[in-house]
Each structure stands twice: as structure tokens, then as C-alpha cells.
Image (cartoon, helix red, strand yellow):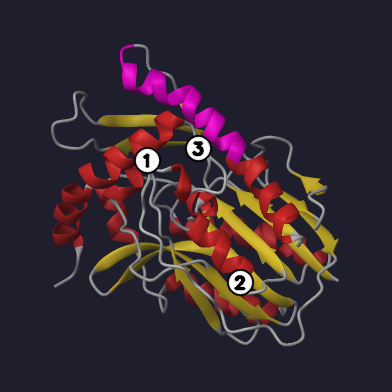
Amino acid sequence: MVKIGIIQMQSEPLKVKKNLSLAEDLIAKAVKDGAQLVVLPEMFNVGFYFGADLMTVAETLDGKTMTWLKSLTAKKNIYITTSIYEHYQGHYYNTMVMVSSDGNVQSYRKRNPTWFEVSVWRRSDVPGPGIFDTPFGRVGGVICFDSFSRESFEGLKHSAVDLVIIVACWGTSQNILWRPDVMLAHPTLKQWSNLASRAVPNHYATQLKIPTVFVNQGGRTYTPCQTPRFYPFPPLMNMRYDFCGNSSIRDSSGRIIVQAPGNEIDFYAVESVDVHPVSHPPEPVRSDISNRYLSSDYYIVQPPLIAKIFQALFTYGLQEVYEARRKQYTPS
């Protein structure tokens, strides 16, 4: 058995110090309730934000956030997993980390940036998912949209993981009456978020027959959103985005042990989870599957068709935006 603490919080864009402080308060509550492994949402340190100035708060794996995480895990004698905004070898990534109580760090970088994310970080060249060896067993780590991919599922299956953890920022954009594309995206994102927070974790739990943790941001945020060249509508200067929340822990049958009530802000829970580590796990296995976003074969759970179309369009349409921003903000 391992006591897992899940934390659903709303991170304020670009306010790293404030976000770390909020996370620390919630971690302290989880540890007080006996948590041995604490899970924070995707991009907890910088918020869910697509403005070019996001690159000004990117960090290395030796930066402020990681130093803080290492200090906290040592002080509390716990493990923490989450994702941070990383600057690495001249590029920017969404990177999941597993930080141990002795300061060891295991990581993997997101493979499938979604829609506007393509303008602020890139797809990792190294196949996922995260395979993290811990005293609690082998943990499979997945970031947000990566959880839909067959690449992630097959990697976790063939690596004999004992527990799956998904960190995310799923939600829905606000409807804008004069923007047909946003009107079309709104119900799509709502359906997509529901699949991501419910159907996907259930799929991992029931198909792999292991406990599955899903941790999302909660509340609401605002962000600018760049559009590709030749796109028929201008960039969005201040899009509202409502997280769906629904952070949860499921047992190996898919039964929900605990779940956050909707998109509540500053929610935490600690539950004992029955994990059965394999005594001699195989070497980690990863499959490098190209991102064929319009193909049903790419997914284990099918996103809405409109989501696939937008995913393909923005993935290729925003790459030049990312490159221009990277050259502007990357230190010489």
C-alpha cells in the first residue's frame, strides 16, 4: 500500500513564486494526512499560458522550481511528481519529473503539444512515456494529451508499470459569439475534457489492471492565443479557459476511490492505494510512433473529430511562431 496525495490547484500564469507557495501549503496538508507520494498538476509552476513571455520563466532541471522540489521532498521525506516548463538545449519543453526524497530526478518530455501549446513548447524527440522506478513500484508518468496516444499506452503496458499517473490541464474555452472557430471549439473541448478526465484514466486502470491517478488544474485562467499564418481569424488576446478539474484516484478495477468535485480550486485528498510491484520488472520499453493526428490508429481513446483537425492544423501551422519566439527569448 502507498498513500498518494493528489492536489488540484489553479496556478497563476507567470507567477512562479506565488504558485510554489500555494503548492507548498497544499503539500503540507497532504503530508500531514500521511501522503508518501504527492501529485501536482501539469505546468503547476508557471500556469497554463500561451503568450510569448512564458519563455521568460522557463527553467532548467537545476533551476528554482527543481531546487524547491528537491528541498521539499527531502524535508518531508516524500516523492513528488508534476510537470514544469523547461528550457533545455535551446528549446522549450513541458517536462514531467519524479523527484525522490534523496534528490534524484527522473523525467520525460511531452510528446504531443496541443493546439496553442505548439507556439510555446516543442514535441520531444525522445519517445515517452515516463517510466519512473520508486520504492512504491514502477510508476508510469503521462502528460495530458499524451495519455490518448497508443505510444504511451504501449510503453506503459510493455514496461510492466505498477501505477499510472496522468498530470493535466484539461478544460474548455469561453464561447465568443463573433468567432465561429471558438464556437466550434467550445463543445469539442468540453467533450474532449470529459474523455480525458474520465474515459482515459478508466481505460488505463481497467486495461492494464493497475491503479491510475489523474490530476488536473482547477478554477479558471486567461491567456493570449496565437493563430497560424493564413488562419482566417486573428489571435485571441485574452481567452478565458475553465479547467474541468475532476482529479481522481482509481483502483485497478477502474473504481473511483476519490475525486475532486468538478473544477474546485485548492483541493487535496490522500488515499491509500493498493500497489503490487513486480519483483523483477523488465527494461523500459518505448515505441516511437509518429504523430498522425488524423488517424484513428494513433489513439487508444478517440478524441472528437474537430479536435483531431485542429490538432493537425495547429501542430504544423504554429511551428514557425514557436521558432520566432524561441530565437527572441533564448539566451545567447
Residue found at x 63% / y 46%: 200
Q: Position of residue 277 (x, y in %)?
A: 77, 78
Residue found at x 72% / y 80%: 77
Task: Give me the C-alpha separation between circle 3 and circle 2.
Answer: 24 Å
Q: Residues within 10 Å of mark 1 (few under 14, many from 20)?
A: some
Which of pointers 3 and 2 indicates the residue nearer the eye?
Answer: 2
Q: Nearer the viewer, residue 153 or 184?
A: 153
Quarter of the C terminus within the rendering: bottom left
Task: Give the secondary structure at mark 1.
Answer: loop
Q: Nearer the viewer, residue 70 or 295?
A: 295
Q: What amino acid is found at the position of numbered circle 2 in the picture?
A: His
Circle 2 residue: 158
Q: Earlier in the sequence, mark 3 or mark 2?
A: 2
Q: What amino acid is found at the position of numbered circle 1 in the picture?
A: Leu
Q: Quadrant of residue 260?
A: top right
Task: Give me the C-alpha separation between circle 3 and circle 1.
Answer: 10 Å
Q: Which residues are magenta?
A: 178-195
Query: Can residue 223 be seen here?
Result: no
